Image (cartoon, coloured by chain):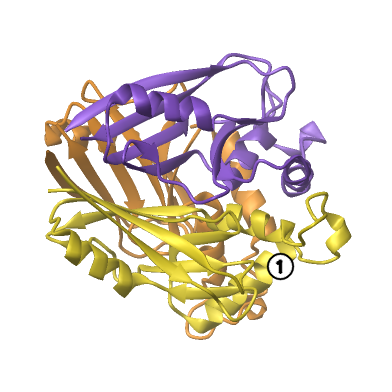
Chain colours: A orange, B purple, C yellow
Amino acid sequence: MKSYREYLWFNTKNRVELINITDRVQQIVDKSGIDEGLCLVNAMHITASVFINDDEPGLHSDFKKWLEELAPHEPISRYAHNGFETNADAHLKRQIMGREVVVAITGGKLDFGPWEQIFYGEFDGQREKRVLVKVIGE
Amino acid sequence: MKSYREYLWFNTKNRVELINITDRVQQIVDKSGIDEGLCLVNAMHITASVFINDDEPGLHSDFKKWLEELAPHEPISRYAHNGFETNADAHLKRQIMGREVVVAITGGKLDFGPWEQIFYGEFDGQREKRVLVKVIGE
Amino acid sequence: MKSYREYLWFNTKNRVELINITDRVQQIVDKSGIDEGLCLVNAMHITASVFINDDEPGLHSDFKKWLEELAPHEPISRYAHNGFETNADAHLKRQIMGREVVVAITGGKLDFGPWEQIFYGEFDGQREKRVLVKVIGE
């Protein structure tokens, strides 16, 4: 069994951003030399997500609006967590969107349906954060 | 390390359906010949889910009602994504229910607690869709 | 490829509890003797979660309050599932928080960002329940 790990780094301009990382993950799979196996992609920070959905700007604005309804950023005083920090909502949003995805590797490729794309979901940005990509297989 | 992949196909009669696929996944694990490892089961479409919960009709009607409250289908105009399509709610519902499950394989069996069952969650049906099952191990 | 499985047992005093299990999972990884691979940690019961977030008491009280808003326990009659049981809300809460996490193992350690901690989320406690830890790799 072979394994390979690499990080992706982010430092977003906005507090909330959704970034397509599919090509960067496929490049890491290429470097791994693994043809058959599994690829784990996870946020290493607890106010960010990795998820799979559609790369359509309208949908992304729907996601942001919907997450803001389900877990509003304000009022800041709404959350017990918001003492030194003001990012409690980001911890909740990340639970809805998920921490990680596991993707099958088949024939050296991310084994995807026609519209599947991997996104980094940042909910408390403007600082350095990482995503871990771990590939195992043969 | 061995690996094995197979698809399950769906074309549901209704827009929203929850379908128990546990036996079909176990049959794929049987075919894989893998005794110890991991089994990834994921929707290959971004308006569908794979999740693990209870096979109880009352709970399934609760799930449908609850998802409709959290991410209503109508009004269609509520969502920026709903231009050519009208399925933005299905993209959101799938984030709540999840894209995938990873199940341990032990002694050739899905290593489950007493009530765990795997479901395909369709939120924008009446068209052909696939689930990927990938088994790796030895 | 090596594999190793162990259970963690829980019997919480309260109906809802969030318990840090990071050290116990690392101990199982240690016992597995696996240096590079993947570690699956999943609830074996369908009214409980395993998730990764921050170990901060304010945030945990925010999680409990927020989940109670999204999927209220009462009125019991709100849910079709609540015939013999009264735990429909726990099945819904677990979908928000997730069933499982998959963690990379690198150099024999859970490959975590600075604040990542693994939690068992109990939403229908006061009974014996299990978490499965399965490690595969080399």
| Image quadrant containing the N terminus of chain B | top left
Q: Residue at x 49, y 20 (%)?
A: B8
**SS of the residue at dot 1?**
helix
Image height of A7 relative to C62, above or below? above
Where residue C99 sits in the image (x, y, percent)? 50, 53
Residue placed most toward the observer, C25 or A58:
C25
Q: Is residue C108 visible?
A: yes
Left or right: B129, with B134 as reference point = right
Left or right: A59, with A128 as reference point = right
The part of the image, by quadrant, that contains residue A31 is top left
| Image quadrant containing the C terminus of chain B | top left
Q: Residue at x 12, y 48 (%)?
A: C138
The part of the image, by quadrant, that contains residue C28 is bottom left
Residue lying farthest to the bottom in this orientation: A83
Chain under callout 1: C
Residue placed most toward the observer, B94 or B132:
B132
Q: Quick one: label 1, few (<14), some, or many (20+) residues within 10 Å?
A: some
Pointer 1: what residue? C68
Image height of B104 relative to A129, above or below? above
Residue lying farthest to the front in this orientation: B107
Where residue B45 sits in the image (x, y, percent)? 52, 26
Image height of C62 relative to C29, above or below? below
Where residue B101 sits in the image (x, y, percent)? 45, 41
- The amino acid sitting under disc 1 is Glu
The part of the image, by quadrant, that contains residue C83 is bottom right
Residue placed most toward the observer, C51 or A75:
C51
Where residue A47 sits in the image (x, y, percent)? 45, 63
